[in-house]
Image (cartoon, rainbow, N blue to C red):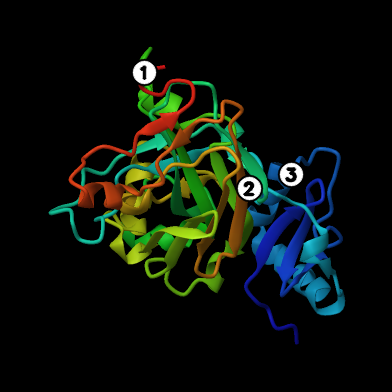
Amino acid sequence: MIQEAALKLVFFNNHTLGVVKGDRVIDISEAVPVNEHNHAQGLLNRIIESFEDYRGPIQQLLDSEEGIPISSVSFNSPVPNPHNIVCMAVNYMEDGTRKSPAPINAFHKSPNAVLADRGSIILPDVPASIFEPEAELALVIGKTATKVKEKDAYKYIFGYMNFIDMSARGLSQGGGVFYQMKSRDTFAPMGPYLVTEDEIDNPLNLQIQLSVNGELKQNFNTDDMAHKIPKVIEWITSIHTLNPGDVVATGTNHRGLSPVMDGDKVELETQGLGRLHLSVIDDLKRTWKRETRLERQQQGFDSTTPQTEGKYSQGT
């Protein structure tokens, strides 16, 4: 009898479909045949929508194939081109420092902002006051969700993954501030893989850690979430339908946010979801003081750390 296990789904080496097994990747293309009409996102959506039909054949390959070392592959985004990326705004209690939750709110990111593991975040030539990576838990929708009730919300989740909501703050010219700040190319890193929901015992008790150049910046637990996952799904689907393969990012704890700049190495690890590795490129070579928001607050400041050198810095 086949023992079915939770899965870590990946796209690798130019969108070959696979599953991570220990320190190796198993090609599962044989279990999920590709036809000429399948692009990568379409293939993923087909698996999500008919997962129980594919799970047995996938498991047979996992039991029989040795695979190849993870170190020898290049990952693509596990969700290459979602129809929707919905991001929750101000959705943490900030380690209990907020007296009450902020009103529930969200925004969209462009699917063209998606970035895979070991990709490069490109800082654009815009007068942002700071560029900050925001560590988040993201969920991927498993079936069409319209007007879902809180009590049923988890039935609509296919899996979970790491997500970074990159932000270019301080852009005020021309309106559409959130659009300018959040939807730029490379501003939605995710991965390295998509973990099926049955591998995560409690998504509301996961430790999230983000480091810059090996120094821990964000370190918080999803139990600090203000509007919990069931309420988030109920609220979003009261406004518009979510489809299989859509991504919902659940927000961040802002206290550890800090700037990134050219040459930085960013790593995000959420408990059970692997580690996402990224680099940062800024052709303008701008610099900021290396301070978190909490460190600024402890010094008596209520603003983000200032830019110190380069184009758009104060006095240039």
Q: What separation in Å lies between label 3 and label 1 (alpha carbons)? A: 47 Å
Question: Which mark sits nearer the N-terminus, 1 or 2?
Answer: 2
Disc number at residue 149? none
Mark 2 sits on what residue?
79
Amino acid type of disc 1? Gly
Structural distance between the alpha carbons of marks 2 and 3: 8 Å
Residue positioned most to the bottom: 1
Marks 1 and 2 in Cβ contact (< 8 Å): no
Residue 55: image location, x then y, percent = 71, 68
Residue 23 visible (yes or no): yes
Q: Quadrant of residue 213?
A: bottom right
Q: Is residue 241 left or right of residue 187?
A: left
Residue depicted at x 66% and y 51%: 117
| Residue count near mark 1 (Cα–Cα under 10 Å), binned few <14, some 14–19, many ≥20 | few
Q: Residue 100 location in percent, x, y?
A: 15, 53
Marks 3 and 1, the one that precedes in the sequence = 3
What residue would you read off at disc 1?
A: 315
Comparing 55 with 118, the one in front is 118
- The secondary structure type at the circle numbered 3 is helix
Residue 141 visible from this viewpoint: no
